[in-house]
Amino acid sequence: MIDFATSVLGRDVALRKTENSKGSKQNILIGSVKRINSGKVTKAVSCHQKLYPYLLYYCHSVPDVAVYEADILDPKTKKKINHGCGHLSLGYFFMVTLAAAGHDLKKANKENPLTPKAHLNRYWNKKINNNVPKSHFLLSKASPPLKAIDIANFAKLATPQNSPALPGIVFNIYGPYEDILKNDINFMNYGGTSNESSVQPGEDEGDRPAGPPPANPLVNKKKMSYKKMEPGSLVTKTVEIQPGTFFREWMLKSGTVMPMPDIKDKYPKTKFLNKNLVPKIPFSSSKFSDMKKMFHACDNSALEGIIKDAVKDCERKPNQGEIKRCVASAEDMIVFATLVLGRDVALRKTENYKGSKQDILIGSVKRINGGMVTKVVSCHQKLYPYLLYYCHSVPDVAVYEADILDPKTKKKINHGVAICHLDTSSWFVGHEAFRALGSGPGQIEVCHWIFEKDLIWTNVDH
């Protein structure tokens, strides 16, 4: 689009469009009016969206046109509700022109209703709301092995968008990479740097907790931070542990007041791939250069780090007793969950993020599968250009569902899912949970909430 516009108009171009759809199918009042290029007959490129599986525009230039910009007001309140380009817009056109052929542009102030002298009530006689399905442009520099149809599917799922905050990133992302991952507590690799530790049998089945509360802290009530060295490098980063990130099973009782960490999903909005497309997109350390080309990731850029981190987690050897798989399609997630749990499965997730970063009151509590130690598949979202989940099953866990209430009003604000790891004997000694709760591997059980957009699969609770 840019190439065509500059080939017709030169490089000194401006992009104009109608601001929104307000004013559609009603009378409007024309406010201040500006004629582009000082009222001269001008050359323009108009681009009109076509209905098509990916974003497609019909762009053309026609002679002898005039282009106007006008504030569109509500006739009753005189308040501005829109800012329109030209005298008519059938959608969110990038450049809209007003045909001038056949009338004297020198008399435009008298004949044309879009002038400062003509603040008239006019009927906005075309529906300007764009109801074309939302699609995306193709990637401009696609790399093999994708074919055109695959690129179209991929572009629909991961919209490229340059971010000034992240040089080299070509997809939509919130803020710097470091800010997103700063509080990204590790709920995936409990074994840390050690994969050789043995997993001991879990607790006996039955209702828990019982007896007096344990002597260790039941929940980390204060924000903590510590320095962590990145594996395979001398670079250190500061890891922050928010209040309420980890807690003991004792806390999951009606009437408990406890802090909740920020469980809000801060990752960019992405979509799953089509299951048939997944095997055609490179995803492995051996194809890292192809992945960088596909996503236009520059050397040492934040995007390169995102790709490398995802591949590293997905290719990491499972901890003993762990079954893991990274999935990029909904079908693949279901296949993995049913492979581990059988076909009688239920999907559970925390309802929303309300209660984040504040004290909450635990309401009614339900332990899944009748209080039995159970098998689950937890799926944690990874930061990646398309929707990617790290799914794994670890032994000896208990799953809870709990109503989350406002401590002051006692009103329900959320419905949370929590998972308790009953046997931590194989966990890395430096895991954040032990830092927060003041203990060590095998000495305590550790619970945490399932964050917004993370998912947990269990057997159906009959």
Image (spheres, rainbow, N blue to C red):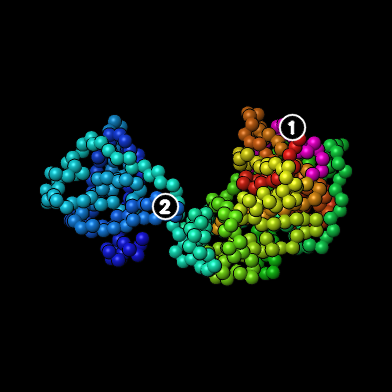
| In contact (CB < 8 Å): disc 1 and disc 2 | no
Q: Is residue 305 visible?
A: no
Instruction: Find residue 218 and report its image quarter.
Output: top right
How far is disc 1 from disc 2 in space, using C-alphas?
53 Å
- Looking at the image, residue 92 sits to the left or right of residue 326; the answer is left
Instruction: Find residue 411 and report its image quarter.
Output: top right
Looking at the picture, how far across and down is residue 160, in whole percent?
48, 58
Residue 52's label in the rendered image is: 2
Q: Quick check: is 255 in the magenta stretch?
A: no
**Image label count:** 2
The tag earlier along the polypeptide, 1 or 2, is 2
- Looking at the image, residue 132 sits to the left or right of residue 247; the answer is left
Residue drawn 13% across and 49% down? 103
Residue drawn 17% across and 41% down? 117
- Looking at the image, residue 138 sits to the left or right of residue 92; the answer is right
Q: Amino acid at mark 1?
A: Ser
Looking at the picture, how far across and down is residue 293, in whole percent?
53, 68
Mark 1 or 2, which is nearer the eye? 2
Around disc 2, counting alpha carbons within 10 Å, would you say few (fewer than 14), some (14 to 19), or many (20 or more)? few
At mark 2, the secondary structure is loop
Q: Quick check: is 361 in the magenta stretch?
A: yes
Locate the N terminus by quadrant. bottom left
Residue 254's label in the rendered image is: 1
Residue drawn 64% across and 70% down? 286
Q: Amino acid at mark 2?
A: Tyr
Looking at the picture, how far across and down is residue 376, in whole percent?
75, 47
Q: Is residue 147 visible?
A: yes
The residues colored magenta run 357-374
Residue 262's label in the rendered image is: none
Looking at the picture, how far across and down is residue 216, in whole percent?
81, 45
Residue drawn 70% across and 52% down? 336
